[in-house]
Image: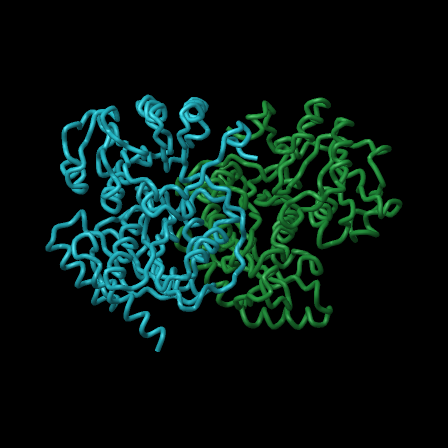
Chain colours: A cyan, B green
Amino acid sequence: MNPAAAAGFQTQSIESLSSYRRIALLTEGYSTPFYAKTAISMLRYRREDVVAVVDAGEQGKRAAELFGVGDDVPVVGSLKNVNADALFLGTSVAGGKLPGEWRAIIIKAIERGLDVVSGNHQFLIDDAEFREAAQASGSRLIDVRRNTENATSTGKPFRDGCCRIHTVGQDCSLGKMVVSLELQRELARRDLDAAFVATGQTGIMISGDGVPVDCVVSDFVNGSVEALIRRHDHHDFLLIEGQGSLAHPSFSAVTLGLLHGCSPDALIYCYEVGRKNVKGLDHVPLVDHRTMINAYESLSALRHPARVIGIAMNSRNVSADEAAAERERMRAEFGLPVCDVYVDGPAVLADAVQRFQQERHR
Amino acid sequence: MNPAAAAGFQTQSIESLSSYRRIALLTEGYSTPFYAKTAISMLRYRREDVVAVVDAGEQGKRAAELFGVGDDVPVVGSLKNVNADALFLGTSVAGGKLPGEWRAIIIKAIERGLDVVSGNHQFLIDDAEFREAAQASGSRLIDVRRNTENATSTGKPFRDGCCRIHTVGQDCSLGKMVVSLELQRELARRDLDAAFVATGQTGIMISGDGVPVDCVVSDFVNGSVEALIRRHDHHDFLLIEGQGSLAHPSFSAVTLGLLHGCSPDALIYCYEVGRKNVKGLDHVPLVDHRTMINAYESLSALRHPARVIGIAMNSRNVSADEAAAERERMRAEFGLPVCDVYVDGPAVLADAVQRFQQERHR
């Protein structure tokens, strides 16, 4: 029994997420790159389905002015004159609590019959006021992080023809989802059958499927990911979004369960140039790249052999010259292709994936 | 909001578990070593608090006849003539569903005012009939696996004087809890300040504290264990119960979150002699000891350095001669003390812990 069922409220699945074509993104008071990560990713990868950004303090601007992506999507002060079919909450705030000023906006959206989609830890469906409003209007409340995953892993292999590429990292929050999405799009442009597999709330909002691994009960992390991959292993390439880091003091359980659940064939190692300490834990120094790469390869091998075939560096905090020097240094040190997908595009890494696939079939 | 709160039912904590002095153990129909693991461990480590075992099919016997432990604790057909203060469910069945024939026994216990304690995945408190009976009689329903852990790790060090010893394994279900408990008792006999830290349902029923790590949401596994250790790091030695295995296809997330959350100083590596495949996944071969030990040491080092200081072998499935030969072979190969705590006692491993502690302080 879950709270929603206890309250007689129909549980909503995430399956309808990809059906919305007129999405409003709520970032009220939080329209900064740091907070509005979900909104920015939606604008980057689902631009065609977004009709507005809601932030009264920024109204009249265009999305591109606010976030550097989203072209001329208008920033509006309210939903009054917007023809939307869903309101997506555009941030995933620390601790997961909804900003207080959002309540009135969400209630109004529900009253107008919009579905509301949230990736926060605090579930919409656990809020009596939201539930009552939704029951009155027929709106759906979709909590992307909510799950009832309860399958353990079978340990059985995936379809041999499915090449699984997993992004792993030195730390969290450095672009693993973006690298997976950019690679998937590049392989698709090359007429290859490649699918993105989401493992976090933003990726799920973009792709309409996935498992929010950080919210799954620990006994079922590996199993829920295995089942997710099995649903998709008819594709020739899967680009599987990574989470956290094997060395992250808080999130290493999530990272290893995901790694073993998806049993990748190849890994893309991701890091941020210049980052010295664990994000959010400034007293904990990061572990060096060589040790991290060895850890990912040796821990993969306990389940299924995988090697790092490329490095994705995020150079947002250094100059172009510094980035170029770093790229050469890393290439020389690791003998692997290196690029910043935000700046250089994903071609170099897509080449590495194709080479890997050819060697594998030789 | 949780289901119990939704139903207006008071949430019960595990804090009272250690206060029961007249415990009845329910194993009805499941009085075999395989199923009755919880009952057997209660009889081994909390014998003085147990007044009866309930199994109508075995009534009239003594616990020692049924399980090889528990001396003359009587096996009874019902609770009618037993003066008990709590009924502990003595198995943790696959899938976690309660055996159907137990319902009537549990209802009768509740009606007689006994508290009921369960380590199953299926919670007592989610059962409307149990809840109503308990509200009528004043009984408490305690689901040991139920938790609301929601803290992430701080990554901060523990008290330097607290030596943390963690049991890790080649697989699950091979005696890690017993090794931790036996070591704790041996160190205490040597007048050392040593405490056992439980991380699974049976350990929690024995010690009255702990975190059921396999039921914690994955984002909070590391953090919940860190908080648990911090509550206990005033002790000189902590013997921290391990779970699963870094190579287990289903449970490696649990194992790594626990390893990083407790950041041990030393590890005891546990395995079962003769086991070839992962328990419950017969098509998955076990990873060799050398690789496993390297994995535990290198993954520990990402957070805090730890080394394996001893090996606990479980020789239940081989002859005494085979066990002796295996012990010598492992000693020679790894240069570490090796013993079967069930057969040899834990002295050899306790010596290793004391040597480690002396070297550490030199």
Residue A287: quarter of image: bottom left
Residue B201 x, y percent position in the rendering:
62, 43
Quarter the C terminus of chain A occupies: bottom left
Q: Would residue A169 be visible to someone looking at this image? A: yes
- In the displayed structure, A182 sits above or below A162; it is above
Residue A22 x, y percent position in the rendering:
27, 37
**Residue lying furthest right in this view?**
B60
Residue name at image x 22 percent, y 59 percent: A346
Q: Nearer the viewer, residue A125 or A83?
A: A83
Residue name at image x 38 percent, y 63 percent: A297
Is residue B254 found left or right of A294 in the rendered image? right
Q: Nearer the viewer, residue B83 or A177?
A: A177
Is residue A186 found left or right of A62 in the rendered image? right
Residue A197 x, y percent position in the rendering:
37, 53
Q: How many marks?
A: 0
Residue name at image x 52 percent, y 58 percent: B248
Q: Would residue B259 be visible to someone looking at this image? A: no
Quarter the N terminus of chain A occupies: top right
- In the displayed structure, B92 sits above or below B335; it is above
